[in-house]
Image (spheres, rainbow, N blue to C red):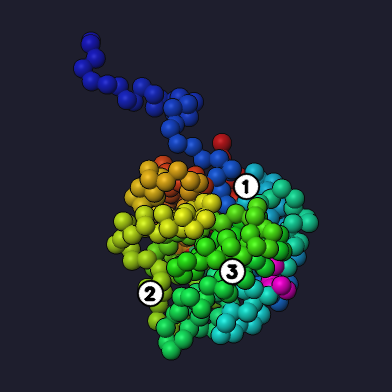
Amino acid sequence: MSQKFPRFRRLRQEEGLRRLVQEVRLSPSQLVLPLFVREGVREREPIPSLPGHYHWSPEAVVEAAEEAYGLGIPAVLLFGLPAEKDEVGSGAYSREGVVQRALRELRKKVPGLILMADVCLCQYTTHGHCGLVRGGKIVNDPTLPLLAETALSLAEAGAHVVAPSDMMDGRVAVIREALDREGFEDVAILSYAAKYASAFYGPFREAAHSAPAFGDRRTYQMDPGNRREAMREIAQDLQEGADMILMKPAGPYLDVIREARERFDVPLGAYQVSGEYAMIQAAAEKGWLDREGAMWESLLGIIRAGADFIVTYFALEAAKKVR
Ligand code: PBG
């Protein structure tokens, strides 16, 4: 019988064939593991809103970093929870801050691992906003020097990459300027260029104790309906000196990732955020989803959309199971 239509199924008959013709693949080299360091913790404490993740002491976090590096994960992204918060987020740029201390440990103990550090004030301010608050408003320009100072203190402590997630306008320029002025020309900037005001950050805010005490983040993070604006944010951050850009969240914004991939020839990361992880985790706990299958599909989808790398709470698990 002559063939009347293409036989797509022919190449799906064997596992080996399917592997051979797979268009998009995932390797541990594409994964970044987020890590939380917390002042006052003894070794580690589980984070209830992020099962499988911990608050680490600045010393014990080495253990988690070593595991990641051993699995072929090239980088970790550090977030900090200080002992005390204040109006101006002093803990973010303290030379003895919890992330700064962790960075010094990690530099010594896990050579080769790339250390990325979040630049933001929200975990360090009493009001929980990413910028300074004056008269009930989150003010842009007065926040910029503090972000530059934070980036500088992280670079001094050993960060290879600083990742501003605050969404203040003009921050990449002041951070680049401060780094260059102080001799950190080689420290790279991964800017959260397009970060949406998202409900999917919920579990992170519980984990990082960073929920805003009043209002929300919609005066600085982007509106979920906007794609063109994301392209303008990216273009601006690149012009100011960003080396790589990060899109966040990932899953609900795959079209934005795809468009960014087509328009900008720079390394592009995507952050599969806490709520994306939590959805899969919670559904799997209920027996409604196959956890591993959903994990793969969600990660492959992000790579297929055009991301070069993914910051994900599944990093360890995915790296272990990669074929
Ligand atoms: C802080 C920050 C947030 C996340 C990363 N950095 C929370 C927020 O903006 O409220 C979210 C990450 C996640 O949900 O996994 N600026």
Quarter residue 46 falls in: bottom right
The stretch in magenta equals 95-100
Q: Determine whether the residue tagged by mark 3 lies in a helix, strand or loop.
A: helix
Q: Determine whether the residue tagged by mark 1 lies in a helix, strand or loop.
A: loop
Q: Are marks 1 and 2 in contact (CB under 8 Å)?
A: no
Q: Quadrant of the N terminus?
A: top left
Q: Quadrant of the C terminus?
A: top right
Residue occupying the point 64% across, 82% down: 84
User: Where does residue 169 sit, x and y in percent of width and height?
Assistant: 44, 68
Residue identifier under label 3:
148
* Of the image marks 3 and 1, the number of the one nearer the N terminus: 1
Report the Cα–Cα distance between label 1 and label 2: 35 Å
Residue occupying the point 44% across, 31% down: 22
Residue 71 vs 274, above or below: the answer is above
Based on the picture, tell me whether residue 169 belongs to the magenta stretch: no
Question: Horizontal placement of 9 versus 234: left or right?
Answer: left
Question: Horizontal placement of 99 versus 275: left or right?
Answer: right
The label nearer to you, 3 versus 2, is: 3
The label nearer to you, 1 versus 2, is: 2
User: Where does residue 297 sit, x and y in percent of width and height?
Assistant: 43, 45
Residue 219 visible in the current orientation: yes
The amino acid type, in three-letter code, at marker 2 is Thr
Pointer 2 local density, CA inside 10 Å: few below 14, some 14–19, many at least 20:
some
Count of numbered badges drawn on the protein: 3
The amino acid type, in three-letter code, at marker 1 is Ile
User: Where does residue 49 sit, x and y in percent of width and height?
Assistant: 52, 68
Q: Which mark is residue 219?
A: 2
Report the Cα–Cα distance between label 3 and label 2: 21 Å
Q: Which mark is residue 73?
A: 1
